[in-house]
Image (cartoon, rainbow, N blue to C red):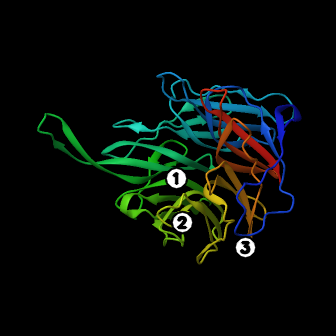
């Protein structure tokens, strides 16, 4: 990132001392990227080519208007400012995730679809963004896509959830009672159209939060069950069909998986949140697949639930909340060692909500939102550091 587009923030360790592995002696220094103003939340970043970075999310209006897409772009060859980039005019709602295979092939997926409507996805062909709707399964009342993974221009996967109608019961007052349940949803782009994939049904109520692929025959999707089935979900695609994997250890009374990164069929990392007891606010949940079994990693005790993960050469980095819910938390894992990345402490009058993390060329980027007492709505948050 250009020097003119960042504000250096000293890396501050969370106030609560870690009960687990000892943090690095010198945590990296974080830089806050200056973005165009606007009430917005960022849901991820990607580099479509070596000289460009995109940050996407959604704008939160201060009136009765609905959410709308927001996309920022930066020319990494210069120290110039970030600029807002136009998306398809017929796309409304949130952008929940983005992916790119090249400067001529990228995707934005997002907002909720209502009964009878498709989920609206956008494709970049190198010149403009165009809507490529993803039809929902039959009897769907609503749903959306929360993650996307692009293997190639003709092989893209997106994951989320659908609200499925079970039946309508006439109400004595003349209305109708709706009985429904939630199911995980995976959509596949074959170069021509989006099509829902046939999935196993691990629970009566469940959904997917993220998806990652190391190749056409190694795709992973993660999420959790809802209600009485409140435990993690992991699905795997081997090039032919989707399979529900055995539930990894999560070490508590509740577990959820929020993000996944597949580095290869024998090197898959999943992060999320576990509750140790009924009064717990949430602790970091990190599990690793070596091709044969799941292993739960010991995270620092002050690390709360994790919402994003990205691959590094030596392992992963992840981001989420501190266990005391007082600000963000970032960590890295390599082998069996998990250490804090010293997420910056909240400044006076500011509270941050980091969400996703990415790594390109040794640069780590964390996206999310921040609130300031001087601002009415959330402001886009983008922090970077170099490992």
Q: Residues within 10 Å of mark 1 (few under 14, many from 20)?
A: many
- Residue placed under numbered mark 3 in the picture: 336
> In the rendering, at what x and y percent does residue 13 appear?
77, 54
Between 92 and 105, the residue placed more toward the observer is 92
Q: Residue at x 51, y 36 (%)?
A: 132
Name the quadrant of the C terminus.
Answer: bottom right
Mark 1 or 2: the one toward you: 1
Between 16 and 272, the residue placed more toward the observer is 16
Q: Residue at x 74, y 40 (%)?
A: 347
Residue 29 sits above or below residue 335 on the image: above
User: Are the two marked residues, 3 and 1, in contact with CB atoms closer than 8 angstroms?
Assistant: no
Describe residue 223's horizontal placement relative to residue 129 as left or right. left
Mark 2 or 3: the one toward you: 3
Q: Which secondary structure lies at badge 2?
A: loop
- CA gap between label 2 and label 3 equals 27 Å
Q: Which numbered marker is on residue 71?
A: none
> In the rendering, at what x and y percent does residue 74 appear?
77, 33
Q: Residue furthest left?
A: 172
- Residue placed under numbered mark 1 in the picture: 209
- CA gap between label 1 and label 2 equals 19 Å
> In the rendering, at what x and y percent does residue 201 appear?
38, 62
Q: Which secondary structure lies at badge 3?
A: loop
Q: Residue at x 48, y 49 (%)?
A: 160
- Residue placed under numbered mark 2 in the picture: 238
Q: Residue at x 49, y 37 (%)?
A: 111
């Amino acid at each position: 990132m250009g020097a003119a587009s960042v504000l250096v923030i000293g890396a501050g360790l969370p106030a609560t001392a870690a009960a687990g592995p000892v943090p690095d002696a010198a945590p990296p220094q974080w830089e806050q990227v200056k973005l165009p103003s606007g009430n917005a939340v960022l849901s991820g970043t990607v580099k479509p080519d070596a000289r460009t970075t995109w940050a996407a999310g959604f704008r939160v209006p201060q009136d009765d208007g609905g959410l709308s897409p927001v996309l920022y772009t930066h020319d990494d060859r210069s120290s110039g400012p970030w600029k807002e980039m136009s998306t398809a005019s017929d796309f409304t709602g949130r952008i929940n995730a983005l992916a790119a295979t090249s400067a001529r092939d990228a995707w934005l997926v997002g907002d909720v679809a209502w009964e009878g409507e498709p989920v609206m996805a956008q494709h970049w062909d190198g010149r403009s963004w165009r809507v490529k709707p993803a039809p929902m399964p039959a009897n769907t009342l609503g749903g959306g896509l929360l993650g996307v993974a692009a293997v190639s221009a003709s092989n893209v996967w997106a994951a989320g959830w659908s609200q499925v109608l079970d039946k309508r019961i006439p109400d004595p007052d003349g209305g109708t009672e709706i009985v429904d349940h939630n199911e995980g949803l995976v959509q596949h782009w074959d170069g021509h159209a989006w099509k829902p994939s046939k999935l196993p049904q691990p629970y009566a109520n469940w959904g997917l939060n993220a998806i990652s692929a190391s190749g056409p025959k190694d795709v992973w999707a993660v999420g959790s069950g809802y209600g009485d089935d409140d435990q993690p979900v992991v699905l795997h695609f081997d090039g032919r069909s989707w399979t529900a994997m055995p539930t990894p250890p999560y070490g508590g009374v509740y577990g959820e998986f929020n993000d996944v990164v597949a580095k290869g069929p024998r090197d898959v990392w999943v992060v999320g949140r576990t509750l140790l007891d009924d009064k717990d606010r949430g602790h970091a949940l990190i599990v690793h697949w070596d091709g044969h079994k799941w292993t739960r990693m010991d995270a620092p005790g002050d690390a709360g639930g994790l919402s994003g993960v990205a691959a590094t050469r030596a392992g992963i980095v992840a981001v989420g909340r501190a266990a005391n819910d007082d600000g963000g938390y970032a960590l890295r894992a390599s082998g069996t060692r998990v250490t804090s990345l010293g997420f910056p402490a909240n400044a006076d009058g500011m509270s941050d909500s980091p969400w996703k993390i990415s790594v390109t060329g040794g640069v780590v980027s964390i996206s999310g939102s921040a609130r300031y007492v001087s601002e009415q709505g959330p402001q886009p948050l983008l922090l970077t550091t170099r490992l």
